[in-house]
Amino acid sequence: MISVAEAEKMVREGAAALQSGDAQTARVAFRRVTDSGRANAQIWLLLAHASRMAGDWPEVESACDAVLTQESTNLRALVFKADARDGQGDARGASSFYRKAVQLAGTMQGLPDDLAAEVRRGAGRARAITGEFQRKLETRLSEAGFDPASRSRRFDQSLGILAGEKQVYLQQPSAYYFPELPQIQFYETEQFAWAADVEAAAGTIRAELEQALAQGSPFRPYLQSRSDRPSYDFHGLLDNPAWSTLYLWENGAATPGARERFPKTFAALEQVPMPHITTRAPSILFSLLQPGARIEPHHGMINTRLICHLPLVVPSRCGFRVGNEVREWQVGKLMIFDDTIEHEAWNDSEEDRILLIFDIWRPELDEGERGAVTAMFEAIDSA
């Protein structure tokens, strides 16, 4: 076995050879140290570097494996390992190591410039590999009769998740969770027999709103301070009229005068299966989002209901995201979604955006379950 002094001398010689571009001489020096059993992770990494210069991908990989056994989060070894997988024809394996390096780098501060450049290179190669994979996959799917025009929206979402372009979002209610309900971001209106009649009434509902506003019916901030509860600001929206509401039904009953001012709106909602739970539900309200306002990502309180948006005033450059899907409001077209999945909204226009919002029972709950949920909240609220 070589002495420590000899090992140090060989490392210096190998590093000098590597710096001068003589990969073969560097490899010989580093191998003698690794074969002696005196190599630490840094010396194995130097061997990987020299072997990478020489294009010896199997040796690059074995050297990187030795590094990662000792230091599992060594970024340079992860990138070199990815290069080795790529060089040996395993593009998908390479992509997984590149992505791991990119993910880890995102948690680290002050990376050396050369290492940061390696991570950026790896990220670019991972994107290229993903693109190549998607093109091949699309070709095979089309050959099998599943081109983009003929397959379902849900299947397309699964492809986005498979490619790492989208993530999985799950229900995370802040107050009450009912198990075993499907994780669906947006529901399609065709599932609800009452939806077409509500959409048909959109013009009438907007006319009633405009008449009420002309008479001075006030909107108020959606989030308001309460003296009987702690105040929690939400991205500057507490007591902020940028996100405002005009309630028709609140705290378990129609607001005073609402039925008289909005008779056709109430009539349009008569057949809608709304939950009636003490002071908690339903809520029926007009929601106004001012120009430039944004409602940051958040979760709703209970997953036994769905939220319905009926857009009435929708300028351009407004948007809405639930989970990994972004949709644009269209005037008169209902949008039905699970608000316990992370969602956000924005208005980047110069005009107000106004919706009618109400909640409905989830269709997956049977009558017995709806009754039990109602009784539970009634018991809680009467305690």
Image (cartoon, rainbow, N blue to C red):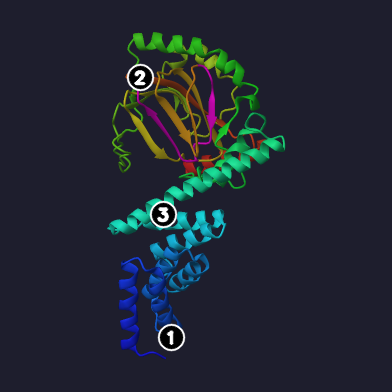
- The residue shown at (44%, 68%) is 51
- Earlier sequence position, callout 1 versus callout 3: 1
- Quarter of the image holding residue 155? top right
- Earlier sequence position, callout 3 versus callout 2: 3
Q: Secondary structure at mark 1?
A: helix
Q: On screen, 315 above or below 81?
A: above
Q: Which residues are magenta?
A: 332-349
* Closer to the eye: label 3 or 2: 3
- Is residue 346 found inside the magenta-colored segment of the image? yes
Mark 1 = which residue?
36
Nearest the viewer among 35 and 209 is 35
Type of amino acid under label 3: Val
Q: Is residue 15 left or right of residue 253?
A: left
Q: Secondary structure at mark 3?
A: helix
Mark 3 = which residue?
102
Q: Secondary structure at mark 2?
A: loop
- Earlier sequence position, callout 2 versus callout 1: 1
Q: Residue 27 at x, y = what percent?
A: 42, 74
Tell me the tag on residue 177: none
Kindly tell me whether residue 158 is visible in this rendering.
no
